Amino acid sequence: MAGPRNFTELAVLRTAELSDRDAYTFVHVEADETLSASSLTYGELGERATRLASWLQERGCHGQRVLILHTDGREFVSSFLGCLLAGAVAVPAPPPDGARPNVERVANIVRDASVSYLLTDAANASSVSQLLANIGHSEVTCLATDRTRVGAPAAWRDPGLLPDDVAYLQYTSGSVSEPKGVMVTHRNLLANQEAIRRALRTGPGTRVGGWLPFHHDMGLVGQLLHPLWLGGTGVVMPPAAFVRKPVRWLRMIDQYGITAGGGPNLGYELCVRRVREEQTEGLDLSRWETAVNGAEPVRAATMDAFAEKFAPAGFRREAFYPCYGLAEGTLLVTGGTPARHAGRRTVDARNLEHHRLTEPRDDRPARTLVSCGLPRDCEVRVVDPESHAHLPDGQVGEVWLRGESVAHGYWNRPLENARDFRATTSDGSGGFLRTGDLGVMDGGELLLTGRLKDVMIVAGRNLYPQDIERSVQRVSALFGSSAAFSVESGGGSDHVVVVQEVRTGRDFDAELTSLAAAVQKCVVKEFEVAAENVLLVRPGTVRRTTSGKLQRTAMRRLFLDGQISPLHEVVAPEVRALVSVDGGRSGGAEDGPYGGERYADVPYADDGRR
């Protein structure tokens, strides 16, 4: 018997055959910090989604874009599946929540996608309707799906979707740039789900769970849709619950028997930094078989610290599963072998600047790269970004992809699609996606080294910003997130800028001065370049994507626009001359993604490629 032609057929099959089985368990945190949960069966999910689908079909929504803004997991999955059942194109996005970056992002998406309908919660309906009016799109119908039962299941009709019809738009940028919606087709989605199954060795009995937001590709494809594809049960916790207290994630894994799940590298860092020893008493992580680490970069030091800290709770080091993926590839691109220690390669950092892997030298800095595993049901090539020549193992270049999981392109962006999704190598092989990521093949496995656009060229040298950031963060226990980037002065010289979050109180001018000096000394000593520009800022200032990846381009733009408000700064005169005097200083903790310092360690934010 042939498999489903589209994800809609698969969902109809699952909700009919498994109607009495729990599709999702939604975890809540009670006032006394205990965890409770409510369930949604496949049958209930099918009825809710079909009702909404019939309502959308009555209004001719086939092929129309429907924006989904839900804070509640039950409503989100029902709305997302309802869009697919109606033949509409789902457009997940973060609810505005009053946060300026999210408001701007939603406004940009409404305009870019020409949204016809908007699905949200009753709690957000009024503010969302006001937002639509403010941006001149009051014609968009806003429906609070939790306020009333809409549509009749009997009125639903199969939309007759083809494999290459677009299932949803995954928006990958937001408030600081024009949004780009990745067109993920039903073929892409089904192919990537099979790739995930083969890579992680999941099955109907796998308990997949986590806290990632559903508008992020890892949260949507890996955490929400994979259990549905498997016919298993997904366990979901609100992202804010994890951000406030990371130990809740670990307790959820224990209490609800999660066997596969994970998040960005920073999520594990937060557990290392903020989970106290007394909070781990009685914690059992022994059933956690696959701890996915999917953000960029994956750090060996983070995995080592997490494994050591939670070994008494039964966590096994070999459970770590570093992998690589991006929205343009639906989700998963490469991954290792479950229950096997991830490969590592320690290399000479100076030669890495020249895009070569060589053994480390005792008298020079070294860098440890973590393997992101083997290509999974797709072709991966490392290509010279200038000549487009395919590079051999051991040479760093841009990662190019080709396969059924690779999306068709960005919504309404033909020029970018021709450049980024239809690339051809120098030997005439075409149809590749240019990822913009830098990596190297080593023994058939992919090791990522950075982002092409983030590489800093200073004094003729290629510097990786994450190396500078990692070194600077070790200067003081008061330091949190860091962002390093370069700016070009009027004379054509490149200058390193370091924006470093610091946890300190008021009236610490002397301490801040010495910390800034220590940062400068660190960069000069380890990288032999001047760090004349250091900004010490409040927690929550450094921006991150939904996967925890630093938005260095955004930070550079904020710096040049005068939109960063430092606690203390040291800036060279020629660089200060570049900073806009019209923008005004801002960007303290109050401007973070959740509007306050208690969310300073949030590992995802308002936008991002993945």
Image: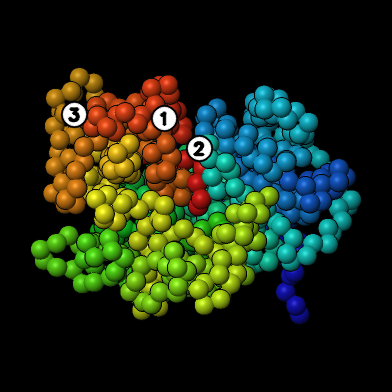
Asked if the residues shown at circle 2 and circle 3 are in contact, with their CB atoms under 8 angstroms apart, the answer is no
The amino acid type found where label 1 is placed reads Asp
Q: Nearer the viewer, mark 1 or mark 2?
A: 1
Q: Nearer the viewer, mark 1 or mark 3?
A: 1
Above/below status of 489 relative to 290: above
Is residue 95 visible to us here?
no
Residue located at (73% from left, 64% from top): 164
The amino acid type found where label 2 is placed reads Val
Q: Nearer the viewer, mark 2 or mark 3?
A: 2
Residue that sits furthest to the left in the current view: 363
Question: Between marks 1 and 2, how big is the CA–CA gap?
Answer: 12 Å
Question: Between marks 2 and 3, how big is the CA–CA gap?
Answer: 29 Å
Q: Decide which of 317, 90 is in the foreground and name it.
A: 90
- Identify the element where label 2 is drawn: loop
Residue at which label 2 appears: 176
Q: Dividing the picture into quarters, in which one does residue 20 lie?
A: bottom right
* Quarter placement of the N terminus: bottom right
Above/below status of 547 relative to 420: above
Residue at which label 1 appears: 561
Indicate the position of residue 251 as horizontal and vertical percent values: 41, 50
The amino acid type found where label 3 is placed reads Leu
Q: Decide which of 260, 575 is in the foreground and name it.
A: 575
Residue at which label 3 appears: 512
Question: Between marks 1 and 3, how big is the CA–CA gap?
Answer: 24 Å
Label total for image: 3
Q: Residues within 10 Å of mark 3 (few under 14, many from 20)?
A: some
Is residue 402 visible to us here?
yes
Q: Dividing the picture into quarters, in which one does residue 517 lie?
A: top left
Question: Which label's residue is closer to the chain start, 1 or 2?
Answer: 2
Indicate the position of residue 179 as horizontal and vertical percent values: 58, 43
Indicate the position of residue 333 as horizontal and vertical percent values: 50, 66
